[in-house]
Image (cartoon, coloured by chain):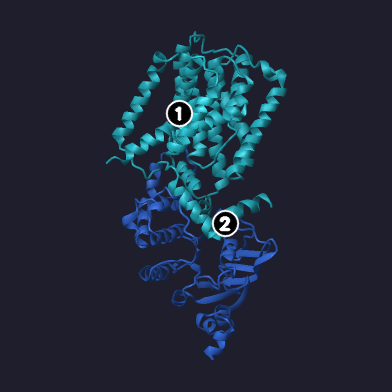
Amino acid sequence: MSPDPPALRAIGLTKEFRGFRAVDGVDLAVAAGSVHALVGPNGAGKTTLFNLLTGFLPQTAGRIEVAGVDVTGLAPEGFAGRGVARSFQITSLFGQLTALEHVELALQSGSSLGWKFWRSAKLMRRYTPRAMELLDMVGLADLAGTTADALAYGRKRALELALALALDPSVLLLDEPTAGMGLEDVDRTVALIAAIRTGRTVVMVEHNMSVVGALADRVTVLQAGKVLVEGPYDEVRADDRVITAYLGEGAVRAAH
Amino acid sequence: MSELEQDKAAAGSVAVADHTAGVRAEARATAPAAPTGGTIVPPWLRWTLTGAAVLVALVLPVNLYPTVAVDIACWALFAVAVDLLLGYTGLMSFGHAAFWGTAAYATGLAAIHWGLPFPLAVLLGALASTVLAVPVGYLAVKRVGIYFAMVTLAFAQMVYYIANQWRSVTQGENGLQRVPRELFGLDLSDEFYFYYAALPIVAGGLWLVWRTVHSPFGRVLVAIRDNPARARALGYPVHRYKLAAFLLSAFTAGLGGGLFAIGHRFVSLDVLHWTTSGKAVIIVVLGGIGTLWGPVVGSAAVTRLEDWLSFAGFEQIGLVTGAIFALTVLIFRRGLWGTLAHWLRRRP
């Protein structure tokens, strides 16, 4: 018998934009319960791959499986319904809603309450205690009543994380969770991801190598839409092909 | 590009195009802010305003020519329906005359041929509009921005031409004449009394939209308005929510259109003309997008002004309303009510 199927799997996943292959036949198997980092130079296709893996872009070819079930062609809300949640690289929030309302909405999404146009919005208060817990977890409890437009950049990133967590996903995809953060916020985010990974599978796009080193069990390096190397962090970091991809030929000679 | 692909690409572009997202966020930040659950209106103010509105609604036909009062009420329903989409869901419908007009015809026909009590005929008319909104909405909500407006406009034009050609039912350019105003044998021929008979339907329609906006559903709509891609990532089927909002809006617009038919005892092709859709949008913008009182205030202002101008024998009414519309868009982006509400809220 084979062990558990991968929590998230891509088979020959390809995305073409008018003849340009942004993602080119990517095979990826993310083991259940692991933290898997996607790295690669700018333009390697990381975010496109993320959009494919959450239904935000239709693939040109290939298959996607969640826990062994074929989910190819599912809409974004379908992925969310199957326990795959994502955060966005470019902070993507509801400008006029408060932080608390954001998390309440995320908590509500699994229930039918959202359809009830004849009931009072006060019913959403049933989600307030859990929403406050989540906001507290990401350090936003004091800012629960602030609208997203009025939050500082780092706080918006934290709210992104709280939203993804509110869905209680089995697979969490984080698109550059520490992008643009100060050192202190980076440390806090790393600690938070380390805390929430229990019982979940985490896939993250990340440029900050110390973050990858601290969190990732396995690393996949993408280049020009293809998988260049895959393996444990230390192995990947020492791989000549990876150093070349990032720094050019000269760097490999210098390293040896 | 397939419909699915286009939509997904539109949604995915949030993450793909950095600067576009930045510009959009900026545009949102400077756009007139619609109140959400995050904005706290003090209860005393809310009750004072509601009380004042009820009072004004009750004395309106005493101080105004009653026909004008009925018109204000009908257009208020229509404009509130348009604002449910424009202000709370982020959808600009430029074809809502289809729903206002279809309800007017259906109500008129039900009243003429079946002699139904007028509230029942109006309800039937609104339901007819809701049924029409199913295919129109189904196709329209898959488009965003200007394309959504174009799809709704195209359907409205189709309905207009069908009504124009289908003379055996609609009487073509002659319109439906002598629509009865039946209510259990009561004499409602005086506009003054009809206004009060119609008022519960108007209040019911306004309440429906108020309830929707302040419901869990309304909260999802605002989220969709602000960021549809994110709402999908949270697991909300955005198309279906938009369609539901579209149906509610068509129903409310239908209530207004049905009452309009009974109020005028006449239905002409004008109710389906694209300028009727345009007037509803103008009323919403003038009163204040994303507010509930705004469309009501806008309806009162526009209807009153039009009546006053035509009474004064002024021919170019559109010139004046157009100029006021342009000034509002340029100077008071939040509209009459929106500006006032914003000013009140900013005071400590």
Image quadrant assignment for residue A130: bottom left
Q: Residue at x 45, y 13 (%)?
A: B65
Residue assigned mark 1: B298
Q: Residue under mark 1: which chain is it in?
A: B
Q: Describe the element under mark 2 as helix, strand or loop.
A: helix
Placement of B308 over or under A204, stated as above or below: above
Which percent across, then down, holds residue B52? 34, 25
Can I make out residue B197 in this image?
no
Taking depth in this image into account, of A215 and A201 the one nearest to the observer is A215
Q: Residue at x 63, y 39 (%)?
A: B150
Q: Is residue A37 above or below residue B145?
A: below
Does residue B286 appear to the left or right of B273 in the view shown? left
Give the chain of mark 2.
B
Chain B colour in the picture: cyan
Mark 1 neighbour density, 10 Å: few (under 14) some (14–19) many (20 or more): many
Percent of width and height locating residue B51: 33, 26
User: Residue at coordinates 71% horizontally, 19% vertically from top-left?
Assistant: B167
Amino acid type of the residue that numbered disc 2 sits on in the rendered structure = Ser
Which residue is at 47% across, 52% downward?
B25
The earlier-in-sequence mark between 2 and 1 is 2
Residue B15 visible? The answer is: yes
In the rendered image of this protein, which colour is used for chain A? blue
Q: Quadrant of the C terminus of chain B?
A: top left
Q: Which residue is mark 2?
A: B13
- Rendered location of residue B61, percent (x, y): 42, 15
**Amino acid residing under circle 1:** Gly
Alpha carbon distance from label 2 to label 1:
36 Å
